[in-house]
């Protein structure tokens, strides 16, 4: 599985990273492990999954986390997470 994380500010890509996980873990564990890696790399707190995020991710394998998904203030407009390759 490969997951692409992208930070956007004023419609510009600020930073991005791809997390690869080819372990035998299930999809949910891989996604949360990838979020942990991204948060460490980007020095962010973990985003809070709202119901709208969950339904968006289930439909499109892609989700946008905005400022209201984070407890602390963030320097970007939104963080996008997209599954680009499934096992």
Image (tube, rainbow, N blue to C red):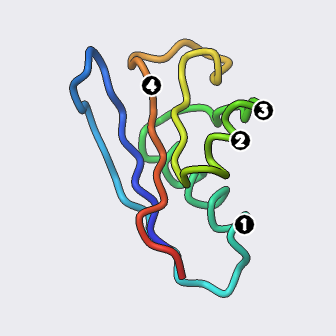
Asked if the residue under mark 4 is in contact with the one under mark 3, i.e. CB atoms within 8 Å, the reply is no
Q: Position of residue 38 (x, y in %)?
A: 48, 49
Mark 3 and mark 4: span between their CA atoms? 17 Å
User: Alpha carbon of mark 2 to alpha carbon of mark 1: how far?
Assistant: 18 Å
Q: Which residue corresponds to the image point at 54% horizontal and 40% vertical from the top-left?
A: 63
Q: Extreme left residue here?
A: 12
Residue at 51%, 48% (x, y): give it: 62
Q: Which residue is the extreme one toward the right?
A: 51
Q: Which residue does the numbered mark 4 point to in the structure image?
A: 78
Q: Are marks 2 and 3 in contact (CB under 8 Å)?
A: yes
- 2 vs 1, front mark: 2
The residue furthest bottom is 24
- Closer to the camera: disc 4 or disc 2? 2
Alpha-carbon span between mark 3 and mark 1: 19 Å
Disc nearer the start of the sequence (2/1): 1
Compared to residue 30, the image places residue 69 above or below, namely above
Residue at x 63% of width, y 60% of height: 31
Q: If you read the primary sequence from the N terminus, does the residue marked by circle 4 or circle 1 appear first? A: 1
| Side of 37 relative to 58 (left or right) | left
Residue 23 image-quadrant placement: bottom right
Return the residue at label 1.
29
Of residue 75 and residue 69, the one placed in the foreground of this image is 69
Tell me residue 17's x, y (percent): 34, 52
Q: Residues within 10 Å of mark 4 (few under 14, many from 20)?
A: many
Which element is circle 2 on? helix
Judged from the image, the secondary structure of the residue bearing numbered disc 3 is helix
Residue 55 is labelled as: 2
Q: Are marks 2 and 1 in contact (CB under 8 Å)?
A: no
Residue 55, percent across and down?
A: 71, 41
The residue singled out by tag 3 in the image is 51
Specify the label residue 43 is tagged with: none
Q: Residue 37: x and y, percent?
A: 53, 55
């Amino acid at each position: 599985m490969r997951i692409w994380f992208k930070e956007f500010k004023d419609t510009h890509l600020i930073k991005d990273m791809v997390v690869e996980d080819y372990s035998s873990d299930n999809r949910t564990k891989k996604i949360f492990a990838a979020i942990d890696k991204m948060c460490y790399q980007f020095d962010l707190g973990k985003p809070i999954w709202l119901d709208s995020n969950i339904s968006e991710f289930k439909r499109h394998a892609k989700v946008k986390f905005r400022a209201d998904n984070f407890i602390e203030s963030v320097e970007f407009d939104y963080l996008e997470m997209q599954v680009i390759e499934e096992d």
